[in-house]
Amino acid sequence: QVKLVESGGDSVEAGRSLKLSCVVSGNTINSYYMGWFRQGPDKEREGVAGIDSNGHESYGDSVKGRFTISRDSAKNTLYLQMNSLKPEDTAMYYCAAAGTYCRGGYSSLGEETCFGYWGQGTQVTVSS
């Protein structure tokens, strides 16, 4: 059984940085398209960043240039480096895994329903 466990969430001031981690167990991280999602107060869940097994990255428009997704195959761990944090980045952040293919094409950050495995989330709070 695949299990995803996030950590690294914290309460920080605007402008600071945080690095989230997601440890994958039950299968190798390279078997999946991996993504980070977030859901803020009274907001819908949105895709933040995604990375495929070849290392190709994609980002939501609101985090481009500030966040970086990466994966360490040796540690079976996914990361999200978040710089220049803003109050609007306040949210519960979730790690998720999708198969390489979904609905006849490659899985992508925009196809949230393709992600079959989810972590429990880690809270990030950014104060102004």
Image (cartoon, rainbow, N blue to C red):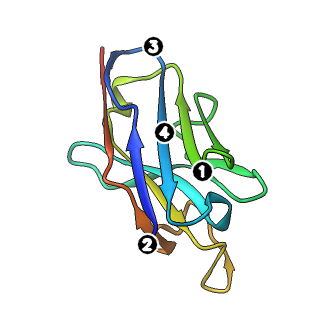
First of labels 3, 4 by sequence position: 3
Tag nearer the camera, 2 or 4: 2
Q: Are marks 1 and 4 in contact (CB under 8 Å)?
A: no
Which residue in the protein does label 4 denote? 21
Q: Secondary structure at mark 2?
A: loop
Image position, residue 4 (x, y; %) = 43, 56
Q: Are marks 2 and 4 in contact (CB under 8 Å)?
A: no
Q: Secondary structure at mark 3?
A: loop
- The amino acid type found where label 2 is placed reads Gln
Mark 4 Cα-neighbour bin, 10 Å: few <14, some 14–19, many ≥20: many
Mark 2 Cα-neighbour bin, 10 Å: few <14, some 14–19, many ≥20: few
- The amino acid type found where label 3 is placed reads Gly
First of labels 1, 2 by sequence position: 2
Image position, residue 59 (x, y; %) = 60, 46
The structure residue drawn at horizontal position 32% and vertical position 48%, both measured from the top left corner, is: 121
Is residue 86 found left or right of 39 in the rendered image?
A: right
- Residue 41 vs 83, above or below: the answer is below
Tag nearer the camera, 1 or 4: 1
Which residue in the protein does label 2 denote? 1
Which residue in the protein does label 1 denote? 76
Mark 1 Cα-neighbour bin, 10 Å: few <14, some 14–19, many ≥20: some
The structure residue drawn at horizontal position 31% and vertical position 53%, both measured from the top left corner, is: 120
Cα distance, mark 2 to mark 4?
Answer: 19 Å
Q: Secondary structure at mark 1?
A: loop
Image position, residue 115 (x, y; %) = 48, 69
Which residue in the protein does label 3 denote? 15
Cα distance, mark 1 to mark 3?
Answer: 29 Å
First of labels 2, 4 by sequence position: 2
First of labels 1, 3 by sequence position: 3
The quadrant the C terminus occupies is top left
